[in-house]
Image (cartoon, grey):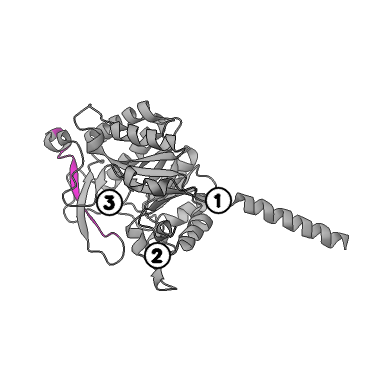
């Protein structure tokens, strides 16, 4: 009897210990620059820990070496007063045909090869393929300017903002007519260089790289995904992604298994449920995924510490 009791106590202790390791993701709101006032009633909720705000490169650097961080200043001040955290995303790729939100000098100076290149996108289920633009991060001259922006941001906001994240790794270029100078390896190397620079510049705030797919890669056949996760785990770099879509095949052949394998070694995992994410349906129910289903997959499989929720998420409108 004593042996049975001691075994039961041991099993209970183990269960408690394991449960304490489980992460309950903190809820953040995801929004764009200039929209904080409109969504603030959601931000003020007690179950919301902070906000991720997307700031485009052009707005932050209207002219070469002249930076305008007034929008971040205002947002940070308001969130600090409300005791909420701020995560900033420095956007260098855009998903609309007219969205060329990089500084004019990048597009007009031959030194930067036009600054941007066309890309294509298929956001969510039931959506037409759209077009947009991506900064030529494989070009050292463009990359140097992006890193100058990161350095200026770090000088002002390191330790003030809760974190900074770099945009998703996925881009979809015209494979038959790729942009001048582009190669799969040069793009990967450029993104890794930007990440290393951001980590060095921001010594106090979290640094997170969004990763979902790498161009030219499927199922880690170039070891881009593997190298990124190894680097991040060894260098105090957080990782995340723009989509939580439970068990979706394309993701399961790319970033998701690496999150699962590295969830105990990454310092921070920050995933998002954006507007396109909400269009996906659970194949078992035929209905859009619920908050509980997103939460369960994010917590148990991906190991998420933070979920950035679209303001369109139904559960946010339930109260």
**Residue 171 — which label?**
3
Residue at coordinates 50% horizontally, 44% vertically from top-left? 266
Give the mark nearer the N terminus: 2 vs 3.
Answer: 3
**Residue 283 appears in which quarter of the rendering?**
bottom left
Task: Find residue 139 and report its horizontal and vertical position in percent.
Answer: 23, 38
Tell me if residue 253 can be seen.
no
Q: CA distance from mark 1 to mark 3?
A: 30 Å
Highlighted magenta segment, given as a residue range: 111-123
Foreground: disc 1 or disc 3: 1
**Residue 148 appears in which quarter of the rendering?**
top left
Decide which of 218, 272 is in the foreground and name it: 272
Q: CA distance from mark 1 to mark 2?
A: 24 Å
- Check disc 1 and report the residue beneath it: 23
> With 216 as the anchor, is 293 left or right in this view?
right
- Check disc 2 and report the residue beneath it: 249
| Secondary element type, mark 1 | loop
**Residue 54 — which label?**
none
Q: State yes or no: residue 296 in magenta.
A: no
Mark 2, Cα crowd under 10 Å, few <14 / some 14-19 / many 20+, is: few
Decide which of 79, 127 is in the foreground and name it: 79
| Secondary element type, mark 2 | helix
Residue at coordinates 35% horizontally, 48% vertically from top-left? 39
Q: CA distance from mark 2 to mark 3?
A: 18 Å
User: Quadrant where the N terminus lies?
Assistant: bottom right
């Amino acid at each position: 009897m004593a042996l049975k009791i001691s075994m039961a106590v041991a099993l209970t202790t183990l269960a408690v210990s394991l449960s304490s390791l489980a992460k309950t993701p903190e809820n953040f709101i995801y929004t764009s620059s200039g929209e904080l006032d409109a969504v603030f009633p959601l931000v003020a909720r007690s179950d919301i820990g902070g906000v991720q705000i997307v700031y485009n490169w052009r707005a932050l650097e209207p002219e070469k070496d002249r930076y305008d961080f007034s929008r971040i200043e205002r947002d940070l001040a308001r969130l600090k007063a409300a005791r909420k955290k701020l995560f900033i995303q420095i956007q260098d790729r855009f998903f609309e045909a007219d969205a060329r939100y990089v500084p004019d000098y990048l597009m007009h100076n031959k030194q930067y090869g036009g600054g941007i290149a066309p890309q294509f996108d298929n956001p969510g289920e039931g959506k037409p393929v759209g077009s947009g633009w991506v900064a030529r991060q494989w070009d050292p001259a463009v990359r140097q300017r992006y890193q100058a922006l990161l350095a200026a941001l770090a000088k002002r906001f390191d330790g003030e903002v809760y974190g900074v994240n770099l945009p998703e790794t996925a881009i979809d270029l015209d494979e038959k007519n790729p942009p001048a100078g582009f190669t799969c390896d040069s793009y990967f190397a450029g993104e890794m260089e930007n990440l290393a620079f951001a980590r060095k510049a921001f010594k106090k705030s979290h640094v997170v790289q969004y990763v979902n797919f790498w161009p030219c890669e499927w199922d880690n056949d170039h070891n881009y995904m593997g190298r990124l996760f190894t680097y991040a785990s060894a260098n105090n770099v957080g990782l995340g992604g723009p989509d939580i879509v439970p068990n979706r095949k394309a993701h399961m052949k790319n970033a998701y298994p690496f999150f699962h394998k590295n969830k105990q070694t990454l310092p921070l995992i920050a995933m998002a449920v954006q507007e396109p994410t909400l269009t996906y349906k659970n194949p078992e129910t035929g209905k859009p995924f619920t908050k509980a289903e997103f939460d369960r997959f994010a917590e148990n499989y991906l190991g998420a510490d933070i979920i950035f929720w679209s303001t369109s998420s139904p559960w946010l409108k339930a109260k």
